[in-house]
Image: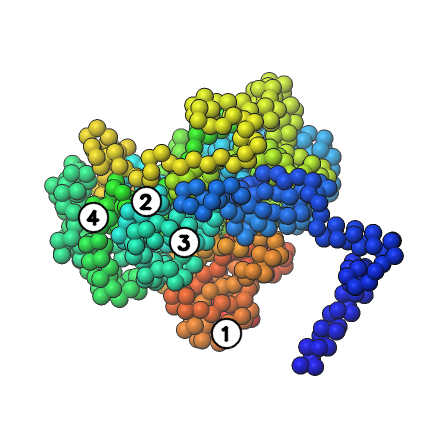
Amino acid sequence: MSDSILQGGISRRALVKSTAIGSLALAAGTLSLPFSVRSAAAAVQQAMQPAEDKIVWGACSVNCGSRCALRLHVKDDEVWRVETDNTGDDIYGNHQVRACLRGRSIRRRINHPDRLNYPMKRVGKRGEGKFERISWQEALDTISSSLKRTVSQYGNEAVYINYSSGIVGGNMTRSSPSASPIRRLMNCYGGSLNQYGTYSTAQIACAMPYTYGSNDGNSTSDIENSRLVVMFGNNPAETRMSGGGITYYLEQARERSNARMIVIDPRYTDTAAGREDEWIPIRPGTDAALVEGIAWVLINENLVDQPFLDKYCVGYDEKTLPVGAPANGHYKAWILGQGDDGVAKTPQWASRITGIPAERIVKLAREIGSTKPAYICQGWGPQRQANGELTARAIAMLPILTGNVGINGGNSGARESTYTMTIERLPMLENPVKTAISCFSWTDAIDHGPEMTALRDGVRGKEKLDVPIKFIWNYAGNALVNQHSDINKTHEILQDESKCEMIVVIENFMTSSAKYADILLPDLMTVEQEDIIPNDYAGNMGYLIFIQPATAPKFERRPIYWILCEVAKRLGDDVLQKFSEGRSQAEWLQYLYGKMRARDPALPAYDELKKMGIYKRKDPNGHFVAYRKFREDPQANPLKTPSGKIEIYSSRLAEIAGTWELKQGDVISPLPIYAATPEGWDDPKRSTFPLQMYGFHYKARTHSTYANVDVLQAACRHEVWINPLDAQKRGITDGDMVRVFNDRGEVRLPAKVTPRILPGVSAMGQGAWHQADMAGDRIDYGACINTLTTLRPSPLAKGNPQHTNLVEIEKV
Ligand SMILES: Nc1nc2c(c(=O)[nH]1)N[C@H]1C(S)=C(S)[C@@H](COP(=O)(O)OP(=O)(O)OC[C@H]3O[C@@H](n4cnc5c(=O)[nH]c(N)nc54)[C@H](O)[C@@H]3O)O[C@H]1N2
Ligand SMILES: Nc1nc2c(c(=O)[nH]1)N[C@H]1C(S)=C(S)[C@@H](COP(=O)(O)OP(=O)(O)OC[C@H]3O[C@@H](n4cnc5c(=O)[nH]c(N)nc54)[C@H](O)[C@@H]3O)O[C@H]1N2
Ligand code: SF4
Ligand SMILES: [Mo]
């Protein structure tokens, strides 16, 4: 008691003594005051509650899969308060596009004391973070002369635009390498090396088309027609937090349909968190084995939809097995143990691999086989494993076997699709360079590009690369270091200036990627310039947001369009003319919006949209149903697969499996089977590094963006999840500082000891900022998961298997 009085006394005295505002406010409240003090008090009052100069429509344009409207309150050219959408209501389909905790903290990013203010050139070694301020003139001259030199010495194939998703919604500001203004600029200057796939969906986006011809799912809103929801590694409560409202849709739709929800995930996620009917924890990377165990029950208990399989599919049994496939090469034979491995995929077999009791697998199979329609879907966690291509197609087998594809309330097994309005993007023009690498293999292309081939490394458009990457553009991305894999090895590759000769980073902050820049340019944020952006994943209500600059440009920050026009000018008048077509940023927007309205006359006029800030429209078709037309009439509406049908057995994959040069342990298969992987649950390496480890997409940040906001760090701590059984063995209690390590590196962070994760598995939020002394011990005190991940690509997509890792954890 006396302690708390003392504390109260101290803090109050400290407040009065330390801030003039405190003492004045205190006085103003209690006494009648002389004029000078009163006006000072009024000033204080005003400082605490500034009068509004204006409210500006903005948006949070990070790559979180949502997209949220922001209303930025601006006073004296500073954003001082952040509100979200105030249009619409709480009614399903006309709801407010509300920002999550991150968007609502954007003021702390805009006004952050660490923001980049001036162009800089590197003076230390790459990665050291030593820079010197230079003029825009010098920065732009250096970039353009280096670009000219690279192109003349090595050719356009030596220039690469690195993966970056810092701004996905933007049109003029978009960062996606295939659709950014940098891509347009390079296409005006002879082109540059292409990339295929994304860090988000490399494996699933590559694999699903072999089954379906594309990678579509029903919209989440369609769950109102479902009786059962089965989610494999899908966590919308964290990965689709607000805005588009996928989480909201999910809950609203389930309330209407009363569908049971089963969550299959190594972690008890926020999506489960009391709202699920059942959580089935599974070993990472083993979903395909669970599917096979379920398939065995479905087949043996006559729960498969045989007419659907006969009419719409290829390769389920011998009736539809394509010509050229081996006898007994079909799915049914494989499951029943008549395939070339001779192993029956019984629930007991699946149990040993997945860690799920056999009885539970049987029960799940019966439930899936007898509850229709069922919305069976997957997030992208399972496919970010080393066998992700197989897993993605395997999960699709459940809706295929049960005939849930192409109907309301069902799904294809893919992640949700969304309704989106027409959007006319900045045209990219044609890239004269046709060669492409996977988005994940650029470090290989720097290190040993000319050794990379089509059959071994997935080079497309050519047999092999001719030149290594010599020049990198990195705009609004942190995948040069933080978000790529094996940071310690990547550091070695980037440090060597004889390899990649020029790295240009365009950023708002000194990120770990920015530290490797040769030239570092301070960009405006999206909310500081004009742009029109559409929703991302949003169920059956789409929308457009017209962003206005909240404040004038501060310091020497410049918009990307200006930066690129200046580079274009230095590359030649013809380049500038081709790139800009003589339009300013505002003129481009008006021009592109004109094209949108020509295609979709129901859109509001340009000035009207500007005033409205946000324009919403409900999907006129109700819900998006993937492959509906194919289901209705497969002859008239064939899929984009070679047979036009659902290919359970893919002859194209059989051919690839027979011709590509694969690494030991890599499996490509015409059937969607389970395959063990390096660093999987049964790798002998587990005797040294016994815990499986992956990084989940965390509510505290969007990848690494917003990670430097103090209130978010405090609200959602960065911790490594570990089961009490594993913790006890290691003498670890909740909150202990631990070292998490493998032979690639070591990170340090507190442990979260929790039964919410399966024993033998550990996980941490991905996206924390790497923070290590790279010239010293390299221990990463920021605990970025990519200190621990591998550069070995997945077999088919050559994608990022960043969720497949083995580690050991010890108390510090
Ligand atoms: N281990 C592991 N690694 C992963 C993943 C994983 O699950 N596990 N996920 C992967 C996935 S799915 C993705 S999509 C990638 C994402 O990787 P990135 O695309 O690199 O995403 P961010 O880390 O958010 O980096 C975006 C950068 O853009 C900057 N930025 C934001 N707004 C602006 C702006 O207006 N202007 C400029 N110039 N810069 C801006 C931010 O400051 C930030 O540094 O990470 C991948 N990496
Ligand atoms: N808050 C927030 N939201 C985001 C992002 C973010 O950084 N922060 N990033 C956005 C982006 S770019 C993307 S690509 C998406 C990513 O969306 P996802 O890729 O779906 O997200 P993850 O968290 O990697 O994985 C989803 C779930 O899969 C589980 N999981 C991991 N491995 C396995 C497995 O082998 N089997 C099963 N069954 N489950 C597994 C994880 O525990 C997790 O709960 O999220 C988007 N949304
Ligand atoms: S981080 Fe995503 S959900 Fe949150 S405000 Fe931004 S766009 Fe919306
Ligand atoms: Mo992503």
Pointer 3 residue:
235
| Distance in Å between CA atoms under marks 4 and 1 | 45 Å
Indicate which disc residue 733 carries.
1
Question: Can you tell which of label 3 and label 4 is closer to the viewer?
Answer: 3
Residue 393 visible from this viewpoint: no
Compare residues 565 and 90 and report the one nearer the observer: 90
Residue type, numbered disc 1? Thr
Q: Residue at x 76, y 65 (%)?
A: 15
The quarter of the displayed image where residue 599 is located: top left
Callout 1: SS: loop
Q: Reading the chain from its start, which is encountered first: label 4 or label 2?
A: 2
Q: Is residue 307 above or below residue 570?
A: below
Q: Reading the chain from its start, which is encountered first: label 4 or label 1?
A: 4
- Residue 761: x and y in percent read 40, 64
CB under 8 Å between discs 3 and 2: no
Pointer 4 residue:
401
The quarter of the displayed image where residue 496 is located: top right
Residue type, numbered disc 2? Asp
- Quick check: is the Cβ at mark 3 less than 8 Å away from ligand 2? yes
Callout 2: SS: helix
